[in-house]
Image: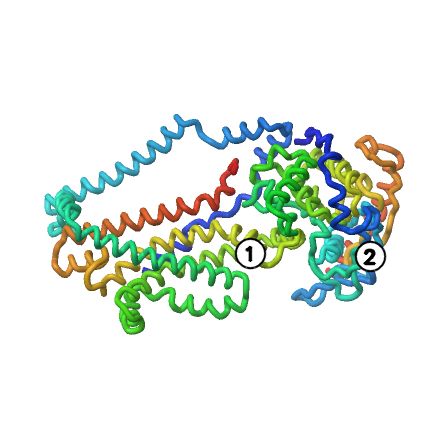
Amino acid sequence: MDSKSNAAIRTEPVAEPPLQPTVGQSAARESKPVLPTMQKQANNESRLPARVWMKTTGVRYLVRTMALIVAVVLWQLASTKGFHFYINFENIPAPSVVGAALMSELTGQEFYLHILHSLERVAIAYVLAVVVGVVLGVAMGRSRWAEDIILPYIELLRPIPAVAWIPLAILMLPTEQSSIIFITFLGALFPVILNTVHGVEQTNSVLIRAARSLGASRTAILWHVILPGAMPSIVAGLAIGMGVAWFSLLAGEIISGQYGIGYYTWNSYTLIQYPQIIIGMLTIGGLGTLCTLLVRHSCSPLLKWQAKGGRS
Amino acid sequence: MSDTPVSNNRLAVLDHSRLRAISGKADDERGRISVRDVDIVFDTVSGPHVAVQNANLTIRPGEFVCLLGPSGCGKSTLMNAIAGFVAPKTGDVQVDGNTVTEPGPDRGMVFQQHSLFPWKTVQENVAFGPLMAGVGNDEANSIARTFLSLVGLAAFANAYPNTLSGGMQQRVGIARALANYPSVLLMDEPFGALDAQTRIMMQENLLDIWSEFHNTVVFVTHDIDEAVFLSDRIVVMSASPGQIIADIDVKLPRPREQSLLTSADFMALKRQCLDLIRKETLNAFEQQNRAG
């Protein structure tokens, strides 16, 4: 899992704060008189008219939905026709079969219990990872000592896949629940730490000097300059961390005795219930995506200053 | 933005009693700077680099002084020593009798560009200093609004800096520095990144605002026109090592307007500065050639 998370960290664009307005924009503003009405104009410029928005965004979502539907149709065909050319679909249940199995799962209580247990574990592990990750990340970004002490651990532990932690987690932690949460926590922790360090180290030194000359204390500089400046990078780390948390969860829930969507998937495999395996996989994918969207959405007020023409 | 009228009723909005209360001194007694025998040395890979050598300078309260010199002459470094960002190796810098050891709100700083907090609105940027000084939220905001109307940007209080032009951002920077009622305003090539037209408007704007406060201003520039137009006194520095080589009084009448730029007195001062700088630049070239 960690090779994937590494790649994600590298490819995820870390948004830079757009400090400078574009040349055209600035020239246009410079020549206009500063009147309150300008604010209104600027506001209108920054938003597309509703009709254009519907057209572009609406069409794009339609394309995305179609792309998924095409895959489902191909899968249905491959399964029902018994496609077997290197890749073998003969034993893969068709979407119609999976759909029927899903319907029967949705009518029972069990399936929801699996989801609830997983959500609980992810929530606890993720909150811990965010708190520990941001604190360590800020410490490392601000202090050479902290970085030199903590970084070797991160470099050494980060490439270890979540599954490999299972024996130690069972040996070291008192309960099955805490072992699973620990494994999930580790997965989410590294992207959060590394992106926080990156964001903090990118702090513009002129802004720190400005704050000092305005009488800000070290604590005030941390709250008013360093953390907001690192926020775009931290939010990227939080989103990546949420994704990694979900696929670490699956590894952790292998040791679960009863509940959890990872356990459900794993158990279906041992029981050779193919439709249930696919239901489990897709549920993890869907929940992971939803949670990542939730993180991005709830963090967006912290980044509204990045939007061109953004007004509070 | 250039034709914005600066608020006419600002005499009414500015609270001068507050200014005096903060300093505990009358206006004409705050902002005395004395730089004595200052050497500033940086450690570099290739050994110590003397950025400023044997600088001696006394600036009277309410004086507008430009530090003029070619790039790399240490004028910004000298200003940073007054600001408290760099420590002199020998000698000391005092402001109002106190030795400078760290930056402080009594010395407001305006940087070249991009020094506003991009995640704070224009008003929050200006209110930041008063908030740090411990005044309440409401008062900090009202001080911020006062200073924003002073620089003609009251209508942009809720805008984020990245939506403003370079000139507007610098005016917010000036408002932010002034909102702490500093006894000294330190300006490090504040208009260097602006186009020529905007720069002239900003210079006039600055003089207009300064006529209100009459605090001490130290203004770093390499632009001779700018130095002559703005200042009471031009301190010319030479490059490597940075030394003060001339101290020129500018006795042009105030208020100063654009027409001054073509007057004979202005030209004479400009020539004097040009000759000094040219000699220095040639010296620097020769030194570089010898070294190369």
Q: Where in the figure is residue A225, as x and y percent of width and height?
A: 56, 52
- Of A263 and B134, the residue lying toward us: B134
- Of B288 and A13, the residue lying toward us: A13
Q: Are marks 1 and 2 in contact (CB under 8 Å)?
A: no
Discs 1 and 2 carry the same chain letter: no
Number of numbered discs = 2
Q: Is residue B263 left or right of residue B176?
A: right
Determine which of the numbered discs, if any, sits on residue B96 in the image: none
Q: Which residue shows up at 49% across the image and 40% down it?
A: A307
Q: Chain of mark 1?
A: A
Question: Which image quadrant for residue A221?
Answer: bottom right
Q: Chain of mark 2?
A: B
Determine which of the numbered discs, if any, sits on residue B34 in the image: 2
Q: Under tag 2, what secondary structure? A: strand
Determine which of the numbered discs, if any, sits on residue A222 in the image: 1
- Of A278 and B14, the residue lying toward us: B14
Alpha-carbon neighbours of circle 2 within 10 Å: few (<14), some, or many (≥20)? many
